[in-house]
Amino acid sequence: MFHVPERARDLTHPLLATTPADGQNGLFDLESPEPGWRLAVIASDGEGWEHVSVHAYRPGRTQRTPNWREMVYVKDLCWDSEDAVMQLHPPQSDYRNAHEHTLHLWRPTRVTIPLPPGDFVAPLVR
């Protein structure tokens, strides 16, 4: 099930501020599990998809692409542990990313994501 970290909702951003009345849609500012970093997360749902975009930054405009640990952290905040969520690599002609340091997580709501056999996937050690 999709859920947003409501306590981290940005209510003041000049362009992306939302309120709880906007449901699962909005900008959320989170402390990263990497010391000294923060995560800007934009969440949305609709048209058959749940989606978050994530980028890492330090106050003062230093930015970088989020790492695996940060993406797992956001996945665990926004979806249940047994939900399958994907990072999608579309055809290059469909690229729409306006921010070079942003990664995305997607989950379709009308179909189940097919998964490979468990033996094909190495277990994640946390």
Image (cartoon, rainbow, N blue to C red):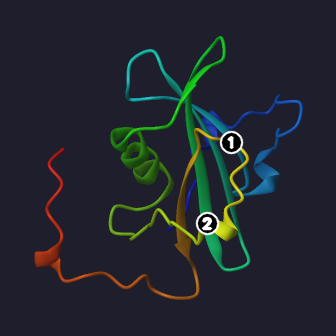
Task: Relative to 101, say whether 123 is above or below.
Answer: below
| Front-lying residue, 21 or 96 | 96
Taking the view exactly as shown, the residue that stands out farthest to the top is: 60
Task: Residue type at mark 1: give it.
Answer: His
Residue at 46% x, 46% y is 74
Reading the image, the residue beneath label 2 is 92
Taking the view exactly as shown, the residue that stands out farthest to the left is: 119
* In-image side of 70 versus 59 (left or right): left
Task: Residue type at mark 2: give it.
Answer: Gln
SS category of the residue bearing label 2: helix
User: What is the CA distance from the residue labelled 1 to the residue labelled 2?
Assistant: 15 Å
Disc 1 or 2, which lies upstream in sequence? Answer: 2
Considering the image in quadrants, where does the C terminus appear? Answer: top left
Badge count: 2
Taking the view exactly as shown, the residue that stands out farthest to the front is: 93
SS category of the residue bearing label 1: loop
Taking the view exactly as shown, the residue that stands out farthest to the bottom is: 111
| Residue 113 % position (x, y) | 43, 82
| Res 81 quadrant in image | bottom left
- The residue carrying pointer 1 sits among few (fewer than 14), some (14 to 19) or many (20 or more) residues within 10 Å by Cα, namely few
Residue at 31% x, 81% y is 115
* In-image side of 18 versus 60 (left or right): right
| Residue 96 % position (x, y) | 72, 59
| Residue 3 % position (x, y) | 56, 57
Reading the image, the residue beneath label 1 is 99
Q: Are marks 1 and 2 in contact (CB under 8 Å)?
A: no
| Res 9 quadrant in image | top right
| Residue 60 % position (x, y) | 65, 11
| Res 25 quadrant in image | bottom right
Task: Relative to 125, say whether 60 is above or below.
Answer: above
